[in-house]
Amino acid sequence: MRERGGPGAAHSRAALGAGPLADRLRAAILALAAARGEGSSTCPSDAARALADDWRPLLPQARELARELARAGEVRLTQGDRLLDPDGEWAGPIRIRPGGPANG
């Protein structure tokens, strides 16, 4: 079945629908990464902002879900030009890119 609405549309519908917050936050991360495409990235805070006006309390969970998605190969995490190991120690701002092989 062909996805309606473009890249990430199904994830967007899940993020904005009903259901457990963690599932919606995971869907928002995937939708934003797909919508931004290979040439760009998104931030965990973008996913948190999409779900709540008071988004800051969601940020730690969004970062942890991004790690889980990176472990599964669904997204890649970067800091500057550096690809992050989802099981590694890192701090500070991260970016989320669509999954797949790193392009540099």
Image: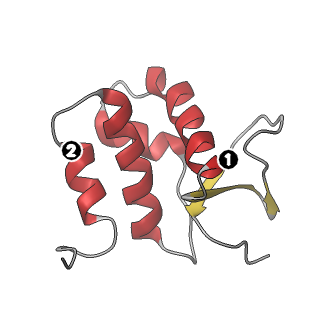
Image quarter (top left, top right, bottom left or bottom right) of the C terminus: bottom right
Residue 82: percent from the left, percent from the top? 82, 60
- Is 7 displayed left or right of 98 in the figure? left
Residue 52 found in image quarter: top left
Q: Which mark is residue 16?
A: 2
- Pick the residue in front: 37 or 101: 101
Q: Residue at x 49, y 40 (%)?
A: 45
Which element carries disc 1, helix, strand or loop? loop
Q: Residue at x 26, y 55 (%)?
A: 12
Depicted 27 relative to depicted 76: above or below: above
- Is 94 displayed left or right of 74 in the figure? right
Q: Residue at x 73, y 78 (%)?
A: 103
Residue 94: percent from the left, percent from the top? 67, 47
Marks 2 and 1 in Cβ contact (< 8 Å)? no
Depicted 61 relative to depicted 104: above or below: above
In this rendering, which labeled residue sits more in front, label 2 or label 1?
Answer: 2
For the residues marked 2 and 1, what is the alpha-carbon distance in whole angstroms? 23 Å
Q: Amino acid at mark 2?
A: Leu
Colour basis = secondary structure
Residue 31: percent from the left, percent from the top? 37, 58
Q: Furthest residue to the front?
A: 1
- Is 66 displayed left or right of 5 in the figure? right
Residue 54: percent from the left, percent from the top? 35, 24
Image quarter (top left, top right, bottom left or bottom right) of the N terminus: bottom left
Residue 50 found in image quarter: top left
- Is 72 displayed left or right of 82 in the figure? left
Residue designated by label 1: 94
